[in-house]
Amino acid sequence: MESCDCIDTQWPPDELLVKYQYISDVLIALAYFSIPLELIYFVQKSAFFPYRWVLMQFGAFIVLCGATHFINLWTFSMHSKAVAVVMTIAKISCAIVSCATALMLVHIIPDLLSVKTREQFLKDKAEELDREMGLILTQEETGRHVRMLTHEIRSTLNRDTILKTTLVELGRTLGLEECALWMPSRNGKNLQLSHTLNFHIQVGSSVPLNTPIVNEVFNSVRAMRIPYTCPLARIRPLVGRYVPPEVVAVRVPLLHLANFQINDWPDHSGRNYAIMVLTLPTDSARQWRDHELELVDVVADQVAVALSHAAILEESMLSRDQLMSQNVALKSAQQEAEIAIHARNDFLAVMNNEMRTPMHAIIALSSLLLETDLTPEQRVMIETVLKSSNLLATLINDVLDLSRLEDGSLKLDIGTFNLHGVLGEVINLIKPIASVKRLQLNLIQAPDLPFYAVGDEKRLMQTILNIVGNAVKFTKEGYISIIASVGKPESLRELRLSEFYPASSDGHFFLRVQVKDSGCGIHQQDKPHLFTKFVQPQSGSGRTANSGAGLGLAICKRFLNLMGGHIWIDSEGVDKGTTSSFIVKLGICNNPNDSSINVQIGEGAIPMNMNQSI
């Protein structure tokens, strides 16, 4: 075997160094040979790897490097030329493979980097999904708290309980340092602190409504961040280094029953607002998150609904209490009215039985005494007794008639009567009094006035007697004229009577009676009160001194209303006389002897002209 002189003979070999190099080459060769085995195992076990051939090329490079170091073991001693050739071939192969691997890596490194980028992108996405999942879980937890808070708020209809529960639950759910509620004051010019969580602000403090920050909160439909030093937050700056807290405010609509319109949405023009202020802990890096602000908005709406329900309940309870008070008052008034009715009935019974009967006896006896021989003084006294008795009897009859008119028990006694006879009887009754006062009494009946009519004779005579009696009573000297005629609907419409609209109908006519006198007259301001019961003239005219109880004209008006008529009085002033007029609807009767009354138009009435004067 030929030897190869590959070792420099001038450098003496150090056996220790050679020994170390020998051991190192052995270890390097073993390491190089183990790496391809590991790569082969990795490729076999990997489900997907896009660069298998690169790994094979890289494994070949490592094997050649290991072979080079392994062959190099024989170069530390005398070796043959064949070893040198093998060593050279191994090194050349290793150089070629290493260069090819280096060039290949230049091409695949960008792809590997893009894979790394996608891996980083996927990693970021995974982290973002984790954050979103955490946010979803937090929102679910917050939603659960909102449902619990809503249940707590709506479980009561007491305003104070609703507001206190809201502040406590919000402070616990959101970890607040302070939660305060500003309510509008009674005068509507300020916001007053009504409820607070930790009493950092004194209850009862007020803020004007025209403050800019208040207007900003009122105009915002969502919760908004406000400065921690504003009047609504009132957080004093801390001494030293600190982190100021974040503060948000949200408006709370205050609805009442009057804000709701039938078949329409609530009227926002008259709505009032409260303000809820929420403060995060001081000296912390925590900030308000979007889902927390949404939670605050939802809670504010729920509080508004609960407060509106409480307000409606309060107003309903107040209305119920008022109705109960009114019912009690009405029941008491009803009992008092029943007692008064019983007392009135008892009084009327006494007047009817215990007073009117003796009064009629006094009138009859006085009339009989006047027919005997009496001295002038006795006659004057008896006439005074008779006059006073007649006045008292008239008053008793008026009171009885008025009571029956008011309770609706008075019924008209409709029948056929002699109209001319009624007017003549009135003249006969009034004649003695007019003769004493030396008054001229005239009765004028129109030619077309029917002899007979259908109606209530008694009430008609009572009405005429009352009006003519007033004329005689208030006239000291002069005349009294009674004019009876048939009133045509056309002429009556021209009078433009208020509250009376005459209309012609078959079988009826309107009797018009006018009583004119030259008496004391009436003030214009007294006219509206002439037909009011128990009211006396206040003008100081001659009627005041001679007035009675104030029932006569009021009863006449009620009688005429029942009979389909109307009454009015005209006067040009004091001492210028008075004209009292009334119209009444009567039926026409051609045959008074027929039991079945035939009512028709008054063309068949027998005309008569009667002028009687005293």
Image: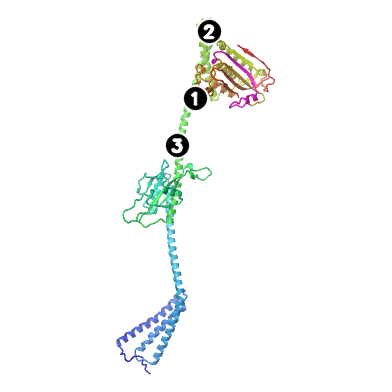
**Amino acid at the residue labelled 3:** Asp
Q: Quadrant of residue 559?
A: top right
Taking the image as shown, residue 408 lies to the left or right of residue 222, namely right
Rendered image: mark on residue 321: 3
Q: Is residue 231 above or below residue 66?
A: above
- Residues under labels 1 and 2: Cα distance? 40 Å
Q: Is residue 245 visible?
A: yes
Task: Describe residue 236's horizontal placement relative to residue 362 as left or right.
Answer: left
**For this rendering, which residue is in front, 240 or 291?**
240
What is the CA distance from the residue labelled 3 to the residue labelled 2? 69 Å
Q: Which stretch did the figure color magenta?
A: 473-502
Helix, strand or loop at mark 1: helix
Q: Which residue is mark 1?
A: 341
Q: Nearer the viewer, mark 3 or mark 1?
A: 3
Magenta stretch: residue 64 in it? Answer: no
Percent from the top left, x then y, of residue 568? 57, 22
User: Viewed as shown, does residue 265 lie left or right of 226?
Assistant: right
Q: Residue furthest bottom?
A: 1
- What amino acid is at disc 1? Ile
The amino acid pointed to by label 2 is Leu
- Which quadrant does the N terminus fall into? bottom left
> How dense is the environment of label 3, judged by Cα within 10 Å: few (below 14), some, or many (20 and up)?
few
**Cα–Cα gap, marks 3 and 1:** 30 Å
For residue 247, above or below residue 65: above
Residue 419, position as x, y percentages in the image: 63, 17
Residue found at x 58% / y 20%? 580
Secondary structure at badge 3 equals helix
Q: Which residue is mark 2?
A: 369
Of pointers 3 and 1, the one earlier in the residue sequence: 3
